[in-house]
Image: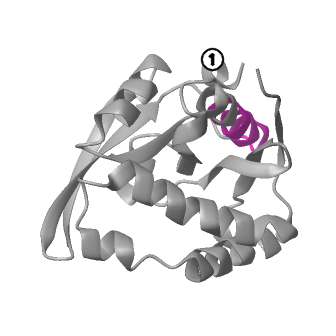
Amino acid sequence: MESIRYREAMPGDADAIGRLHVASWRETYAGLLPVQLLDGLSAEARSAMWQAVLDDPAAFGGTALFVAESKEAIVGFAAAGGQRDGALRARGYDGEIGAIYVLASHQCAGVGRALMRLVAKALVDQGRTAASLWVLRENVPARRFYERLGGVPAGEKSEEEAGMILTEIAYGWNDLSPLAR
């Protein structure tokens, strides 16, 4: 069994996180999102976005960012901070898990669960009590994962992307403390 190490992300991790973000999207959303959308993803653009977050977390709602490493390579990451969705915030979800991605080669091994625990704990440490996240409705494995962790459907939204209507489901945790344990 390979050893996984978890830690807070550092500014020097932005390039690796950006590459993993794109690779994970291509693995996860193949067949769910248009090929042209997945082909158009840029690791450089994602890296720049994560660099900005790592350089100034407060400017991004107090975002906490964690990575999972195996043999010195980042195999997963998760980010959470203040709630960005006004309707969810009005329903009491003061925190948001904005990203959680794990390479397919490391899924179903506890990496996602450990990352969820870390971001939930970070949100609790920030004084937040509840959180939500958005997931593509058709991403059934991720939805089952969130349900196993106690998430309950809390909202739905649709938007057009690359000529396709995409529907996302919000999953929420009214009490982060069990998830943070």
Give percent across and percent down for residue 92.
46, 40
Front residue of 11/36: it is 36
Mark 1: amino acid: Pro
User: For mark 1, what is the residue?
Assistant: 178
- The percent coordinates of residue 122 (x first, y second) are 75, 41
Question: Foreground residue, 38 or 143?
Answer: 38
Left/right placement of residue 72 relative to residue 169 reads right
Query: Is residue 124 within the magenta segment?
Result: yes
Quarter holding residue 49: bottom right
Q: Residue at x 73, y 53 (%)?
A: 64
Judge whether 138 appears above or below 59 on screen: above
Is 145 rendered above or below residue 168?
above
| 53, above or below 64, in the image | below
Across and down, in percent, residue 144 comes to 36, 25
Over which residues does the magenta segment extend?
116-127
* Residue plotted at (72% across, 35% down): 124
Q: Is residue 78 visible?
A: yes
The answer to which image quadrant residue 46 occupies is bottom right
Horizontal arrangement in the rendering, residue 121 relative to residue 112 (left or right): right
State yes or no: residue 85 in magenta: no
Quarter of the picture holding the C terminus: top right
Q: Nearer the viewer, residue 3 or 161?
A: 3
